[in-house]
Image (cartoon, grey):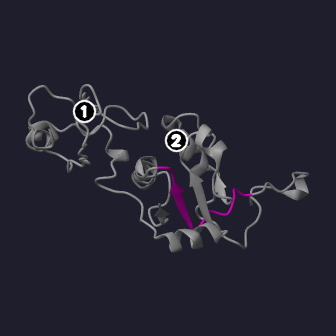
Amino acid sequence: VHTYLGTHPLFGGPELRTRISQWTSSSPPFHRLKVKIKSEIVTLGLGRPMVQRIPRYDPNERVECNRLADPNSTKGTYLSPAEWDDVCRDPDILVIDTRNRYEIDIGTFESSVDPGTENFSDFPSYLEKLAGEYDWGYNSEAVTDSRANPSDGQSAVPCKKKPPKGIAMFCTGGIRCEKATSFALQSELLPSELPIYH
């Protein structure tokens, strides 16, 4: 099966990762093998995935509808466990848990933010809202909106929040956080110089 899948033209894109186990029992552990071709494992809900299911495979017919969440082209910077600990302790880095509500309820990092998403496809909307909460041209001298005029009886309007100096995202198995960091980097919702980690 491994050899067949490895040479089949539909699997010619990313490296085929498999794990082979051998059993010593006289009967196989499974009654039958069923392989399903899925267009996407975890979806951000951005449309069709990168590789459309095409009856006759032609490498020139790759569909790039989901290019904003393609970890094969762009993704956040990987951190070692020690670096991750430092990031979690840094109050100037925003740590986002990209998992769903059920997983977050079981446990999360103390410093992390719960985006409040029920499904991963809610994450792009969350990131768009989050990006609008920060003043990306933050100036520590200006703490109020200059349009407010106290002499007219208007009170000073507070500015948006001071932006983080970086964003770190995590998940359980690596798929969601890779796609989330890829989307964050490619969506142009955040400044291009903002470091994104996972």
> The residue under label 2 is which amino acid type?
Phe
Residue 34 within the segment the image draws in magenta: no
Residue 190: x %, y % from top left: 50, 56
C-alpha separation, residue under disc 2 versus residue under disc 1: 41 Å
**Residue sitting at 29 percent across and 54 percent down?**
73
Say whether residue 163 is magenta: yes
Specify the segment rendered in magenta. 159-172
In this picture, residue 113 sits left or right of residue 98:
right
Image quarter in which the N terminus is found: top left
Nearer to us: label 2 or label 1: 1
Residue 153: x percent and y percent? 91, 51
Q: Secondary structure at mark 1?
A: loop
Give the residue type at disc 1. Pro
Question: Local crowd at mark 2 within 10 Å, few (<14), some, or many (≥20)?
Answer: many
Q: Is residue 126 visible?
A: yes
User: In the orientation shown, which residue stands out farthest toward the front?
Assistant: 26
Circle 2: element type: helix
What residue is pinned by disc 2?
Answer: 123
Residue at position x 51%, y 51% in the image? 171
Per the image, the residue denoted by label 1 is: 28
| Image location of residue 151, percent across then percent down | 90, 58
Q: Nearer the viewer, residue 136 or 16?
A: 16
- Please tell me whether residue 142 is drawn above or below residue 62 in the rendered image: below
Please indicate, yes or no, whether residue 92 appears anywhere in the rendered image: no
